[in-house]
Every structure is written in structure tokens, then in C-alpha cells.
Image: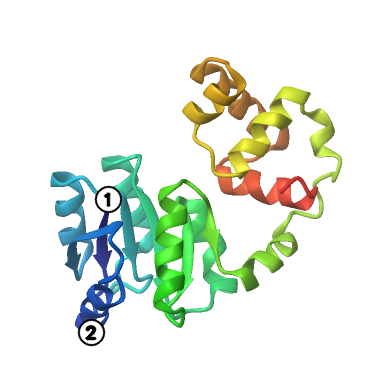
Amino acid sequence: MINLLVLDPHPVVRCGFKTFLKGCDFVKIVKCVENIEQAMEIVDNHHIDILITEMVLNDESPINLIAQAKKSCPEIEIIIYTSLDENIYSIPLLKAGAIGFLSKNVEACVLAEAISKIHNHKLYITNNFNNQLNLEIDLERPRNSFGKLSAREIEVLKYLTDGKRNIEIAQQLKINQKTVNTYKNRMMQKLQVNNIFDLYLQAKSMNIV
């Protein structure tokens, strides 16, 4: 069962989630709240797998929300659910630690699919945005950056970009979980990136994913 927390300042949206996900037996809506303070109280006192939040939060920063939620619960996954343009706002929010970006125009089945995929530790973005990700790559960075990686590092990278967790990669490759983390840190240093999303962008630019 996926424990879900919904944060949106609009009562209609909060009620709508209960209707949208009524037939999803793998999701439990723990609470629907209207501000960051209420959301953090729930995160601090309940087990929450996924937080779905509007980006516009009555002058409160979604970046701060992501930072607070991740500090309180590092394992929590965050989906941005908004009517604003994904091409403008999604990259900084994903880099800040969100793992999904969804338009409020999506159908209920797409919302349910996103929740399911993200719970399985896969990055979720809409198809149109996914097709444009390569446009965000730093063109000044050499495109042969992956030549710096060892065969094992590339193997770990493929699993990471497929949404596998460190423990799953360790089991698959029959290595220690700490070793996986070492490979991940080495890759980030070699490719000059700071987070998994940037690593995904680099891998996509080289057609590794």
C-alpha cells in the first residue's frame, strides 16, 4: 500500500484526489492539507511514501518544501502537480529533489500510473517533456564524458537511470551496497553533476537511456 499525502491550497483539488484515486486499491490517502506547515506535521508523524504538491503555495517556496520534506524523511518521493508550464518550471524542481512533474490536465489513470512508477523509484515526467530533455544538456560539456567511466560504472549507471535502488543494484551485481554508492559518487564527480536527475540528463544525451 502506498501512503500518499496531498498538498494543495484549493479545496476542490484536495477533494478531487479522493475521487480520482477511489478505485486504486494500492493507494491510501493519509491526508489532504493546504499548506507546508500542515504537510510537515504529517510527514514528521506518519509514514508517507509520496507527497503530491501544487507548485504555487500561497507565496511559500516549493523548493523549501522539498528541502524540508527530504530532511525530515529522506526516502519520501515528491511529485509536483500543477497547471503551470512544465518546460519552464520542471527542471529546477526536479533538480531540487522532486521525482515527478505532472500537469493538472492529466487523466486519473495517468495520475495513478505516475504514483505507481514513482513508488518503484522511477523518474516520472510527461512524454512531451521527456522528448525535450536533451535540449537542456549543457552543450559546453564534452559529449564523450562517458568515456571517463569504467565498464562497471556504466553498468551501475544503467541500473540507476532505470530506477533501481542501491540495494537492488548491489543484489543484481552481487556487490556491497556501499560499493554501489562509491560508484555513484565517482560517476557524479567524473561527469561533474550533483544529483541523479543531472546524471539522467547526461545518460540521455549519450543515448544510454
**Could you tell whether 40 is left or right of 71 in the image?**
left
Neighbourhood count class around disc 2 (C-alpha, 10 Å): few under 14, some 14–19, many 20 upward: few
**Could you tell whether 188 is left or right of 114 in the image?**
right
At x 45%, y 47%, the residue is 120
Q: Give x and y (percent) for residue 173.
A: 61, 22
Q: Quadrant of residue 52?
A: bottom left
Q: Can residue 5 be seen in the rendering of this structure?
A: yes
Q: Which of 40 and 51 is in front in this view?
A: 51
Q: Give x and y (percent) for residue 92.
A: 53, 59
Q: Give x and y (percent) for residue 31.
A: 17, 62
User: Mark number for residue 1?
Assistant: 1
Between discs 2 and 1, the one toward the N terminus: 1
Q: Give x and y (percent) for residue 118.
A: 44, 53
At x 80%, y 29%, the residue is 148
Secondary-structure class at tag 1: loop
At x 26%, y 42%, the residue is 72
Q: Which coloring applies here?
A: rainbow
Three-letter amino acid code of the residue under disc 2: Val
Three-letter amino acid code of the residue under disc 1: Met
Q: Can residue 98 be seen in the rendering of this structure?
A: no
Q: Is residue 84 above or below residue 173?
A: below
Neighbourhood count class around disc 1 (C-alpha, 10 Å): few under 14, some 14–19, many 20 upward: few
Instruction: Point out the frontmost of discs 2 and 1.
Output: 1
Secondary-structure class at tag 2: helix
Q: Quadrant of residue 184?
A: top right
**Could you tell whether 198 is left or right of 120 in the image?**
right
Q: Mark 2 points at which residue?
A: 12
